[in-house]
Image (spheres, rainbow, N blue to C red):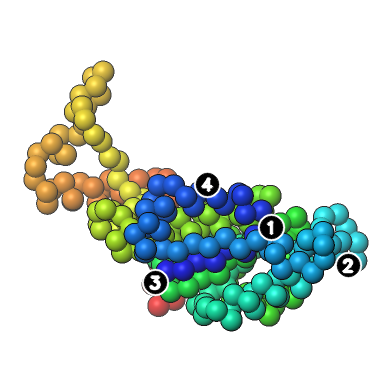
């Protein structure tokens, strides 16, 4: 998979994308992430890519021309299943969406800044808008890093244990069960006896029950979302 991220602040993406699982994915040739500096497509010596918004109001807006040149340049060399704009008013990122995007070959992600990007880019290029939550952060870079991480770890071969991603929280709309490691007793706090039994079928049954109960008490809306998805299908 190839992911191109267009940003005005490439430094914000350097660290999240160059460590741990994402670095491993890139080292193995399973994921290729390219950070594209929008300022490289500016048309003036100052490398200006933002301007005041028409109609007045506080905050600058990223200009249409640099994005237009950048997107067209990238598309002349690669094809993309989706051109994604990270936006607080986009569809909410969830596990189902991450699963779907992980099957893509090439993705392009646009990072807004200040008051956002010129609406014409959204109208003529963006195929999908995604939000990581109902709040506003300084720019789309951190949101893009979250999206890439959520997608990248699902690519076959990235995780050492192929079943690991399948048992994550929100797969099947359930929260993951509690997990424990050694020692089995610490300060009088004991690991549930079932996990020490060696009876794998009963352990899996216990884990499923725990996932169900945790979801019911902590995130009951996930059951509602699951029913809605069934109805839509």
Look at the image and tell me in which quarter the C terminus lies: bottom left
Spatial CA distance of label 2 from label 3 is: 39 Å
Q: Residue at x 65, y 61 (%)?
A: 37
Res. 8 visible in picture: yes
**x%, y% of residue 166?**
30, 58
Tag 3: Cα neighbours inside 10 Å, few (<14), some, or many (≥20)? some
Tag 4: Cα neighbours inside 10 Å, few (<14), some, or many (≥20)? few
Q: Secondary structure at mark 2?
A: loop
Tag 1: Cα neighbours inside 10 Å, few (<14), some, or many (≥20)? many
Q: Earlier in the sequence, mark 3 or mark 4?
A: 4
Spatial CA distance of label 3 from label 1 is: 28 Å
Spatial CA distance of label 1 from label 2 is: 21 Å
**Do the numbered discs 3 and 1 sit on residues whose CB atoms are within 8 Å?**
no
Image quadrant in which you'd find residue 6: bottom right
Q: Secondary structure at mark 1?
A: loop
**x%, y% of residue 213?**
32, 47
Q: Residue at x 82, y 59 (%)?
A: 46
Q: Residue at x 9, y 42 (%)?
A: 198
Residue, disc 3: 103
Res. 118 visible in picture: no
* Count of all numbered marks drawn on residues in the image: 4
Between marks 3 and 4 in the image, the one whose residue lies nearer the viewer: 4
Q: Is residue 11 above or below residue 51?
A: above
Residue, disc 1: 8
- Any mark on residue 54, and which? 2
Q: Earlier in the sequence, mark 1 or mark 2?
A: 1
Residue, disc 4: 15
């Amino acid at each position: 998979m190839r992911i191109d991220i267009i940003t005005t602040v490439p430094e914000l993406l350097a660290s999240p994308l160059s460590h741990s699982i994402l670095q491993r994915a890139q080292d193995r040739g399973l994921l290729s992430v390219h950070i594209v500096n929008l300022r490289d497509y500016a048309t003036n010596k100052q490398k200006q890519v933002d301007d005041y918004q028409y109609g007045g109001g506080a905050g600058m807006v990223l200009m249409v021309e640099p994005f237009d040149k950048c997107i067209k340049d990238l598309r002349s060399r690669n094809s993309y299943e989706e051109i994604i704009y990270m936006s607080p008013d986009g569809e909410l990122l969830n596990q189902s969406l991450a699963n779907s995007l992980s099957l893509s070959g090439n993705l392009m992600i646009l990072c807004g800044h200040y008051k956002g990007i010129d609406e014409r880019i959204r109208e003529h290029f963006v195929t999908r808008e995604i939000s990581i939550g109902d709040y506003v952060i300084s720019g789309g870079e951190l949101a893009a890093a979250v999206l890439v991480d959520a997608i990248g770890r699902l690519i076959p071969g990235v995780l050492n244990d192929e079943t690991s991603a399948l048992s994550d929280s929100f797969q099947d709309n359930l929260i993951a069960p509690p997990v424990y490691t050694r020692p089995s007793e610490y300060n009088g706090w004991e690991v549930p006896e079932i996990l020490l039994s060696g009876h794998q079928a009963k352990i899996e049954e216990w884990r499923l029950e725990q996932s169900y109960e945790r979801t019911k008490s902590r995130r009951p809306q996930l059951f509602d979302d699951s029913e809605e998805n069934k109805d839509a299908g």
